[in-house]
Image (tube, rainbow, N blue to C red):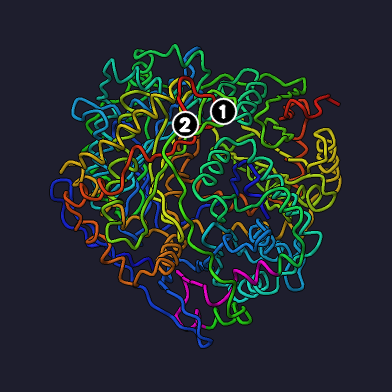
Amino acid sequence: MFGARIWLGLSLAMAALPAAAGGVSQFSLENGLQAVVIEDHRAPVVVHMVWYRAGAADEPRGTSGVAHFLEHLMFKGTDDLGPGELSATVEANGGSDNAFTSQDYTAYFQRIAADRLELVMRMEADRMRDLVLSEADWATELQVIIEERNQRTDSNPGALLGEQMRAAQYLNHPYGTPIIGWRHEMEALTREDALEWYRRYYAPNNAVLVVAGDVTPAEVERLARLYYGPLAPTEGLAPRQRVTEPPHLAERRLTFADPRVQRPYVTRSYLAPERDAGDQTQAAALTVLAELLGGNPATSVLGRALVFGSGKAIAASAGYDGMSLDATTFSLRVIPAADVSLAEAEAELDETLAAFLRDGPDPAQFARIRSLIGANEIYERDNVQSLARRYGEALTSGLTVADVESWPDALRAVTEADVMAAAQAVFQRKNAVTAWLMRPESEGVLP
Amino acid sequence: MIRVIAAFALMVGLAAPARAVVEIAEVTSPGGLTAWLVENHEIPFVALEIRFAGGASLDAPGKRGAIHLMTGLLEEGAGILDAQGFAEEAEALAAEFRFDVGDDLLSVSARMLTENRDASVALLRAALIETRFDADALERVRGQVLSIIDADSRDPEAIATETFARAAWGEHPYGSALHGTRESVVALTQADMFEARARVMARDRIRIAAVGDITPEALGALLDTLLAGLPEAGAPMPPRADLGLTGGVSVVDFAGPQSIVLFGQVGLPITDPDYFAAYLIDQIMGSGIGSRLMTEVREKRGLSYGISSFLVPRDRSETWQGYFASANEKVAEAIAVTREEWGRMAREGASEAELTAAKTYLTGAYPLRFDGNGRIASILVGMQHQGLPRDYINTRNARVEAVTLDDIRRVAERLLNADALRFVVVGQPVGLAQ
């Protein structure tokens, strides 16, 4: 089975967390910094992460890409550290470091020997408030992020279509703007744009510290007080309230033809509710729905019907990730077999969905998926870094530690009726964007 | 356990040497199979890694892609189960199996819950020993492979890789994509699948490692259950591959804003006494975050989002390679800078500070690799394949530390040659002479 290789990576959030992953604890400091500690003493390693509640969806209009630009600039040094010195120091100590930007957060992490936690914490705390940007550094880095866009988006027709789809999916909400930014706005970004962003959002009262590995909560708290404790919060920083979507009245359809398309496919996204603090029921049902419809390539509803049944598809899949501050999407994708048109593939997809909505899930498949929830809890304990990431993501996506810990139970509580109700609510074509990725010579007439 | 007891010295400056100790037991099953085991009963599952040496390079003449297609069929029907029955059973047991093949190795990776271990082993045995290669499964997976081949023909990175491989190894299996061509894959039959399995999956080339919730006795019994009936011997190993790379630039036209660049020259085998010196040179030149290439190409000039170099010590040929993507207008400059850095290292070697930084990074990072059952099992099985002893983990950092500045200078001068670098450029580079 080569489904994974053919598949283009819709993330699946079935992954559940162990209720007590070797002990998860939390504390907060007077300046507003929130902290989570996950103990795992199997290896003498620590992961240190700082997550800011600021992502691309929080950017002022017209400056798309500034959140990600600042992420790059955070490696350019402070009043105490030279350009690149933080990474060089981490590397010189055998560690690795990196950062990532999403719509809802920007995060920085180091993975290093556990006895060097203090070193990385000192440097990370330093750059929370004391970044220094020279004229030469920001201008060169702007070229780097434009190259990044060239590499990741403009050289990839699937990524370009994804960008257009999200822009069509969100009529009003900033999730419709790409994280890396629209090229013309990226090109116009300035040092001052970056610094304004930095001064406002990079502050202890907007940050979540996650430390995981061979550490004790008491030691982490002692160090956090020492290094993050003295930092000044940003005054007047209110909880994020973004604009919301108006009712969606009209289905949207896109076609995109590009000679570089490696595999034509049809894909559809529906606007879908996200996980909310204290209210994860519907998101849990959608998570199970995605697994039922398109999780396992051989046993899922779409795999059964389109790949194994009619043979009209090479791969068929569904994806939903409820970890999001605002309304997210539920996605479907079908890669047609060699002699099958996109119109045929879409028609098969629609028939399969209609049959599922009429007949409901196969009880045996439903039972197998329930048993996977517990197994995933066991397997996930093997990777402390992904646990740490899950907590950081949750706490910057409007959730709490309690929500993370009750997620496996929320998944287990899902009934067949819950799944069908969630499917009926979400599978509304007026909420959907359907897109065809094509080569110029392939048939391009819409049905 | 992941008893990676690492005795970290107290921090001295920024360069404290770290030592990892993993307690590896060698287990021999009653049936005579040998495996390496790290026991850890903290989490109730076991990770099992199996390798068969030879990999896709054992394709029979005219059957390119057979072993790759066969590998994709291992989970598509076995014993009394068809493909979907197999997948349902694995799902019900929450057993995770992965089958993969490269130029040198066929890999089997499994994660099995302790509570479902016996049934999971029986299912994996069916995939390895009682594969059915059903006609419908063969057609379905063949369709997937043809889709990969078609996609690769439009993927600049795949085009660069294939172009480089053809220039480097010609007619040897290393010189072509292991998934075969449209023509070779279309012609493969069910009989070819049985033949492909027999060529590569045999006891005389197997390596096994297990990490997690299992005792040596239980592992021994498990291995005999899992692998009884596996053929004694497979096909003879392929010959060494002569490296035909010459210096210069090859351009493959491909529309897009960027060019993909793959470059390389001759490398050295992992058994070469100078391997660790070369490994440190590579770290300084193009593997680290603050490497010379990253500094010159990205940080100072903004010519690329990233550039890296890497040693590729295959079983039957060795190269020293690198990769980057750059805007079409900038790629000529990026190549010039890369050549200059390559030549500078050959002429001057590295500085004391660079060597120290590379050593502290590599020795400090090493124990951090051992942080999960599956990861440790993969390392152990890789060590067996490379012929390394079980105590290698405890001596590896000392080998890194033993490299001197003179070694760096001598090995860089011996091996690196900017004029010998072949650059394969897929894109529409501006102002680049071929």
Characterize the local packing of mark 2: few (<14), some (14-19) or many (20 or more) Cα atoms within 10 angstroms.
Answer: many
Q: What is the chain identity of the residue bearing mark 2?
A: B
Q: Quadrant of the N terminus of chain B?
A: bottom left
Q: Which mark is residue A122?
A: none
Judged left or right of residue B52, residue B80 is: right
B205 vs B282, left or right, is right
Foreground pick, A223 / B218: B218
- Quadrant in the picture for residue B27: bottom left
Residue A415 higher or lower than B272, as above or below: above
Q: Are marks 2 and 1 in contact (CB under 8 Å)?
A: yes
Q: Which residues are magenta?
A: B195-220
Residue designated by label 2: B325
Residue B298 visible from this viewpoint: no
Q: Secondary structure under badge 1?
A: loop
Callout 1 environment at 10 Å: few (<14), some (14 to 19), or many (20+)? Answer: some
Q: Residue at x 66, y 66 (%)?
A: B196
* Residue B398 included in the magenta stretch of the image: no
Amino acid type of the residue that numbered disc 2 sits on in the rendered structure: Ala
> What residue would you read off at disc 1?
A155
x and y, in percent, of residue A259 in the image: 68, 27
- Label 2 and label 1 in one chain: no
Q: Amino acid at mark 1?
A: Ser
Q: Is residue B117 above or below residue B327?
A: below
Residue B317 in the image: state x and y as whole percent: 44, 56
